[in-house]
Image (cartoon, grey):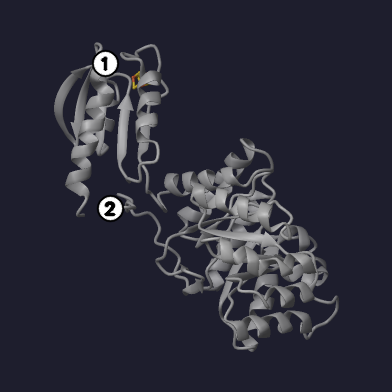
């Protein structure tokens, strides 16, 4: 088993149509893909490829690069040739940059509908030109609505960038794209306000079956930015919404990947590595729990196994949690009762707890490898 299904299924995944982005398929029952964005000058091919490789190494599954200038568009083919994950170009303001980017083998284009159109042009000519070229090239598009850059007419109508305003903006451009016979669409409705983002995604999901890219934009500096992203993305994911995720952290994008996988793991949308359940400790503590957890983390590092391991410091909750986990210990009097698949299998002295857990993990792995 590479990824685990939740024991309590929760809300079913919102049904979305499938859209292919390079080798990844968004929507349907496909995984919620983890993506990020480079911070380099895109035209600096060496620096951009180096950062993409670092992101790939961390587990990033798609990457976006900004294309503000012709030289950035000109670098896309060279970058695409050297990276192994789908490449997305990100366009704001200048529809000509979108057209130029589409001359290169990009896997997806992101358009901000709030700033791409000529003000007052109700024919949406610039957007239509991009849609026609994307359709001709077979490139899918993210219609990336952002609360901070909604088009003027929508802001005037609603007074501020509220969820209905964001959804109306998305639907307006979806309608234009559909009128061109183009349906390879992914939608995002990002806000730096958690409540606005959550309600915007919920509202959109009631009205549309296009896959969504979810994120809390401009979340700021870690660690608060990770907590804020989790606070916003958990309700969306637990509602079954979201087909790809990006965590927006200030600075180096590489930590975004671990943060995204942690949020997917905690919401059980993608459980693919060991989950360690450990108590906070208190005056009842019967073993050196921090030391045991540190050793276990080191031994489990890099393991791709959706296994739940419970390590609790005394017998108050220890046996109960250990029975519910795949593997667990309940500590007492300098020793540990080891559980596997809900049954107590043996007792070991404290010094042998880590080795014993790893042995039980190997047994669990061989028992579960054909599931
Ligand atoms: Fe304290 Fe035991 Fe609870 Fe851990 S499991 S916090 S040691 S009572």
User: Which residue sits at x=78%, y=64%?
Assistant: 68
Q: Closer to the N terminus: mark 2 or mark 1?
A: 2
Mark 2 C-beta closer than 8 Å to ligand 1: no
Tell me the quarter of the picture where residue 41 sits: bottom right
Quarter of the image where the C terminus is located: bottom left
Picture coordinates of residue 364 (x, y %)? 21, 41
Mark 2 Cα-neighbour bin, 10 Å: few <14, some 14–19, many ≥20:
some
Q: Nearer the viewer, residue 208 or 143?
A: 143
Report the residue marked by disc 1.
351
Q: Is residue 58 above or below residue 342?
A: below
Q: Mark number for residue 332?
A: none
User: Is 343 left or right of 288, judged from the image as shown?
Assistant: left
Considering the numbered disc 1 on the image, is that residue within a helix, a strand or a loop?
Answer: helix
Mark 2 and mark 1 residues within 8 Å of each other at the beta carbon: no
Is residue 319 something one can see in this rendering? Answer: no
Q: Position of residue 82 (x, y in %)?
A: 57, 62
Res 348 quadrant in image = top left
Residue 368 position in % (x across, y down): 21, 48
Q: Nearer the viewer, residue 104 or 59?
A: 104
- Image point (25%, 29%), residue name: 357
Q: Is residue 216 above or below residue 358?
A: below
Pick the front one: 195 or 52: 52
Say the numbered circle drawn on residue 1: 2
For this rendering, which residue is in front, 306 or 282?
306
**Dot 1 beta carbon under 8 Å from ligand 1:** no
Q: Is residue 293 something one can see in this rendering?
A: yes
Q: Is residue 342 above or below residue 182?
A: above
Q: CA distance from mark 2 to mark 1?
A: 31 Å
Q: SS of the residue at dot 2?
A: loop
Report x, y in % for residue 210: 53, 72
Residue appearing at x 63%, y 63% in the figure: 79
Quadrant of ligand 1: it is top left
């Amino acid at each position: 088993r590479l990824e685990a299904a939740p024991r309590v299924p929760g809300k079913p995944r919102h049904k979305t149509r499938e859209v292919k982005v390079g080798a990844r398929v968004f929507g349907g029952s496909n995984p919620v893909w983890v993506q990020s964005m480079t911070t380099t000058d895109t035209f600096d091919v060496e620096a951009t490829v180096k950062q993409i490789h670092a992101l790939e190494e961390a587990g990033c599954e798609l990457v976006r690069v900004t294309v503000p200038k012709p030289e950035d568009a000109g670098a896309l083919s060279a970058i695409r040739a050297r990276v192994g994950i789908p490449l997305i170009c990100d366009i704001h303001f200048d529809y000509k940059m979108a057209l130029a980017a589409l001359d290169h083998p990009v896997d997806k284009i992101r358009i901000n509908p709030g700033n791409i159109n000529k003000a007052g042009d109700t024919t949406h000519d610039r957007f239509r030109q991009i849609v026609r070229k994307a359709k001709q090239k077979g490139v899918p598009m993210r219609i990336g609505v952002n609360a901070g850059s909604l088009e003027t007419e929508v802001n005037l109508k609603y007074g501020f960038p509220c969820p209905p305003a964001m959804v109306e903006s998305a639907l307006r451009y979806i309608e234009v794209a559909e009128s061109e016979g183009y349906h390879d669409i992914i939608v995002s409705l990002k806000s730096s306000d958690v409540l606005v983002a959550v309600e915007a995604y919920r509202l959109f999901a009631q009205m549309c079956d296009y896959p969504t890219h979810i994120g809390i934009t401009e979340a700021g500096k870690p660690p608060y930015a990770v907590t804020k992203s989790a606070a916003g993305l958990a309700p969306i994911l637990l509602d079954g919404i979201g087909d790809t995720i990006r965590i927006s952290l200030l600075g180096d994008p590489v930590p975004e990947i671990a943060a995204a996988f942690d949020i997917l793991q905690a919401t059980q949308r993608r459980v693919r590595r060991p989950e360690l359940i450990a108590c906070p400790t208190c005056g009842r503590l019967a073993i050196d729990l921090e030391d045991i957890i540190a050793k276990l983390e080191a031994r489990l590092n890099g393991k791709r196994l959706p296994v739940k391991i419970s390590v609790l410091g005394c017998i108050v909750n220890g046996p109960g949690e250990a029975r519910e986990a795949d593997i667990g210990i309940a500590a007492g009097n300098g020793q540990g009762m080891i559980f596997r698949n809900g049954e107590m299998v043996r007792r070991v002295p404290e010094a042998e707890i880590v080795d014993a857990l790893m042995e039980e993990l190997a047994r669990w792995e061989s028992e579960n490898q054909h599931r």
